[in-house]
Image (spheres, rainbow, N blue to C red):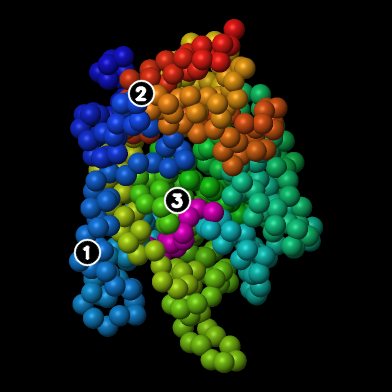
Amino acid sequence: MTESALPGLLPDLEVVRKDFPILSRTLAGGHPLVYLDSANTSQKPQVVIDAMVDHLERHNANVARAMHQLGAESTAAFESARARVASFLHAGEDEIVFTKNASEALNLVANTLAWAEGDWSARVGRIGPGDEIVITEMEHHSNIVPWQLLSQRTGATLRWFGITDDGQLDLDNIDDLIAERTRVVALTWVSNALGTVNPITEIARRAHEVGALVVVDASQAAPQLPINVTTCGADLLAFTGHKTVGPTGIGVLWGRRGILDQLPPFLAGGEMIETVRMESSTYAPVPRRFEAGTPPIVEAVGLAAALEYLDGLGMEHVHAHEQAITGYALDGLASVPGLTVLGPLSAEQRGGAIAFELDGVHPHDVATVLDTRGIAVRAGHHCARPAHARFGVQASTRMSSYLYTTPEEVDALVDGLLYTRDYFKVS
């Protein structure tokens, strides 16, 4: 199919693709790269690469500490990146905490809730015995294990939403599951395995009715959806840079200022303190309280360039492109005999990650054969083993599109899957 024949694609898609130098690669065997693993990590446009190189070449210095021009320039770039993230989320600059990834951001929240003491508001308090934490069966392990550890350390009870047969959260028992003892509801906005887009605002409304804190993993949402933290219902939200056309090594925790103010330090070290004495220390206000030591400076610069790039395209256009490509991919995959998609079958209900089984072929073998044709996908349980167990499978193959994916690349995947069936002589 030609690009113009598929409504919803980004205008000038081939021009956009030229912004990403890696997409012009030719792999072993002379095959052009077909990159369908963006839910794992996205590719980076030249403007992000250039911004990071320029900072290292011309402005490299530590932030906050250095009393010289380079230090001032580096500090200004770092704080400008914080402002850029705030704008992307429609948040306040003092509500943006830089972490090394979304996993660290979620661990920060889970751990500090266990340590919190003192004068807490009715909405936020220390987790203890008898309290309940609610998650979902479709979470990435990074939004399961921290809450398991918190429950084990505090005596709280961990509960979770199940998944329906069509890959949606089962909300039939929401009023029983989110109840008087619920202190935290932590869930993904967009599933990295099933692709499901969850009704965050609806769930947050119920959580707030009982005074619970809502923690959202937006790692898959931030690359695909316009996000406004003032309206989505989250109290705290995490995402990672490398899935939003930015670099690895940088993540973001956003939190309502009134909530962040009540959380104790997570990591200790330089810059997160006000005064250190041998007997005790006092701590800096947020967000610096949660940014111990030398931060990921050049990574923050790269993230700022990445979010500037996404906003330049328009997140509403990125989302429309994802839905168009996802719908086209679902139709294409449906034409492959013996292939079963995990999760919703409607593009309107899901993001760009599509996990599937191919009868008679192990997911690792599927990915290996596709790789010989230049097609990059992921195989395994995608750090979402409970979601796979819910559907009775050990692993799956996952294709994941993004703003640079073309219909022709989806066609290449479908052809590659048909070739894989023939290669393994699947009847």
Give the residue at x 58% y 58%: 107
Q: Which amino acid, by three-letter code, is at mark 1? A: Glu
Looking at the figure, which quarter contains the C terminus? Answer: top right
Q: Which amino acid, by three-letter code, is at mark 3? A: Thr
The x, y position of residue 207, in whole percent, is 63, 48
> Would you name the residue on which mark 3 appears?
240
Q: Earlier in the sequence, mark 1 or mark 2?
A: 1
Disc ID at residue 409: 2
Callout 1: helix, strand or loop? helix
The x, y position of residue 72, in whole percent, is 25, 75
Give the residue at x 31% y 26%: 30
Tag 2–tag 3 contact (CB < 8 Å)? no
Callout 2: helix, strand or loop? helix
The x, y position of residue 401, in whole percent, is 41, 31
Judge whether residue 32 is colored magenta: no
> Would you name the residue on which mark 1 appears?
57
Question: Does 82 sit left or right of 378 as displayed?
Answer: left
Residue 316 in which image quadrant: top left
Compared with residue 150, is residue 163 higher up or lower down, i.e. above or below? above
Q: Earlier in the sequence, mark 1 or mark 3?
A: 1
Compared with residue 72, is residue 424 higher up or lower down, i.e. above or below? above
Q: CA distance from mark 2 to mark 3?
A: 26 Å
Residue span colored magenta: 93-103
User: Can residue 317 be spotted in the picture?
Assistant: no
User: Can residue 296 be spotted in the picture?
Assistant: yes
Residue 155 in which image quadrant: bottom right
Q: CA distance from mark 1 to mark 2?
A: 36 Å
Compared with residue 300, is residue 419 higher up or lower down, i.e. above or below? above
Q: Residues within 10 Å of mark 3 (few under 14, many from 20)?
A: many
Looking at the figure, which quarter contains the N terminus? Answer: top left
